[in-house]
Amino acid sequence: MEKKIAILRGINVGGNRKILMNDLKSMFHDLGIPDAITYIQSGNVIFESSLDPIELSDLIESAILEKFGFVVPVIIRKAKELEKSIKSNPFYDSEADVNNLHLTFLKQKPLKSDLDLIQSIDYTPDLFVVKDMNVFIYCEGKYHESKLTNNFFEKKLKVGATTRNWKTVLKLMELSEG
């Protein structure tokens, strides 16, 4: 069994696609994952499973559709992958203001041609770096005012994605270690 994190895209935003965390935990229990821990209403679940991330993603997406009646994309990361992502963030150091940092989790690796196209885009002072299945974002101002949105990366990279602020990323790592 290995610690994993399910990161759900677009739930409980503006009263849409509402899922209570207790209901989400109950759904995980019904899937045979009794130890699930949820963190905040944006849909983050820490749990143990021996299934591979793609199988888990499909299983959880199907269960959400069946139980709640709408499609929610789910991205799975192993705790070890999340730890590596944290260490790989080019904007995160001892002097970084974590309020300026975000991580966009990609569902799969983008095509090289799409990566090449996005590298030429400049939205300074906001910055981004794509590494593997992550987009590390530095926003000078407020994230919701930036052009480096989740939808921007999904459209340009042609892959599913969901974004979390850096405080949430660090908390998910902390919870997955416990």
Image (spheres, grey):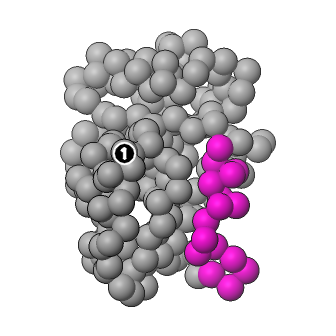
Q: Which residue lies furthest to the right in this view?
A: 178
- Residue 176 is situated, as x and y percent measured from the top left of the image, at 70, 42
Residue at the location (48% across, 66% down)?
A: 129
Counting other residues with Cα less than 10 Å from the Cα at mark 1, is it few (<14), some (14-19), or many (20 or more)?
few
Horizontal and vertical percent for residue 13?
28, 52
User: Which x, y percent locates residue 96?
Assistant: 63, 81
| Residue 164 as seen in the image, left or right of residue 1 | left
Q: Quadrant of residue 73?
A: top left
Using the rendered view, name the quadrant where residue 9 is placed. top left
- Going by the numbered disc 1, the residue's amino acid type is Leu
Observer-nearest residue: 11 or 173? 173
At a point 21% along the width and 45% down the height, the residue shown is 16
Disc 1: which residue? 111
Q: Does the magenta stretch include residue 154?
A: no
Does 152 sit left or right of 46 as displayed? Answer: left
115 left or right of 48? left
For the record, the magenta segment spans: 81-96
Residue 81 location (% of width, % of height): 65, 44
Q: Is residue 43 visible?
A: no
Residue 102, placed above or below residue 10: below
Q: Is residue 135 above or below residue 49?
A: below
Q: Image quadrant for the C terminus?
A: top right
Mark 1, secondary structure of its residue: loop
Residue at image point 67% right, 26% down: 48
Nearest the eye: 169 or 156: 156
**Picture quarter with the N terminus:** top right
